[in-house]
Image (tube, rainbow, N blue to C red):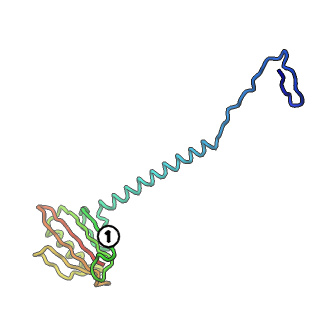
């Protein structure tokens, strides 16, 4: 048995046979890569959670997404449904139709008085208030072809508010 000493072959006679000690191979870049991926995953999950929370909060609050930002929002009303039609399925001359249904714990007379007052201020005007039918027709002062209807339906002590706005 012989071994190479770097210059020449040397006999192993009388020398104990030594095995070279294998050093464990460390790969620190793998740990950095795994840690970075884990960090990105956590950041992504937190961001997605915040986005879902924000969307759910804006839908459940009185932030009427499809109505103009200056449209009067009834205090404490809860959004039941919201539908936006865009394009060819809307009225002649319009490009967007917003339909929302809200619920309030107030009676019809209180909600009617609120919308009748608020839709006579700012860029809004009331065309007709038809309490017999529970309807208030309105339009924008700055763009009269943008018009809508607030329909109020009594449900016991609650009021269902249906808003349609075409613009």
Front-lying residue, 85 or 44: 85
The residue to which callout 1 is attached is 66
Q: Quadrant of the N terminus?
A: top right
Instruction: State the residue at coordinates (60%, 44%).
Output: 32
Q: Is 118 left or right of 37, judged from the image as shown? A: left
Instruction: State the residue at coordinates (23%, 66%).
Output: 101
Q: How many marks?
A: 1
Q: Quadrant of the C terminus?
A: bottom left
Front-lying residue, 121 or 80: 80
Q: Is 164 left or right of 2, judged from the image as shown? A: left
Front-lying residue, 130 or 35: 35
Q: For numbered disc 1, what is the local secondary structure?
A: loop
Residue 100 location (% of width, % of height): 25, 68
Residue 49 location (% of width, % of height): 41, 53
Q: Farthest residue toward the top?
A: 14
Q: Is residue 36 above or below residue 149?
A: above
Residue 26 location (% of width, % of height): 66, 37
Disc 1: CA contacts within 10 A as few (<14), some (14-19) or many (>=20): some
Residue 105 location (% of width, % of height): 18, 61
Instruction: State the residue at coordinates (33%, 76%).
Output: 87
**Image quadrant of residue 61?**
bottom left
């Amino acid at each position: 048995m012989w071994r190479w000493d770097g210059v020449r072959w040397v006999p192993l006679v009388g020398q104990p046979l030594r095995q070279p000690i294998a050093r464990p191979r460390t790969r620190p870049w793998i740990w950095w890569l795994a840690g970075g991926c884990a960090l990105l995953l956590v950041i992504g999950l937190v961001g997605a959670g915040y986005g879902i929370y924000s969307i759910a909060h804006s839908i459940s609050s009185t932030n009427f997404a499809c109505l103009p930002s200056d449209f009067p929002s009834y205090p404490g009303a809860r959004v039941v449904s919201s539908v936006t039609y865009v394009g060819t399925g809307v009225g002649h001359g319009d490009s967007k139709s917003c339909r929302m249904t809200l619920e309030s714990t107030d009676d019809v007379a209180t909600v009617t008085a609120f919308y009748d007052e608020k839709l006579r201020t700012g860029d809004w005007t009331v065309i007709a208030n038809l309490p017999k039918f529970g309807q208030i027709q309105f339009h924008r002062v700055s763009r009269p072809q943008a018009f809508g209807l607030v329909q109020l339906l009594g449900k016991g002590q609650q009021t269902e508010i249906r808003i349609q706005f075409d613009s």
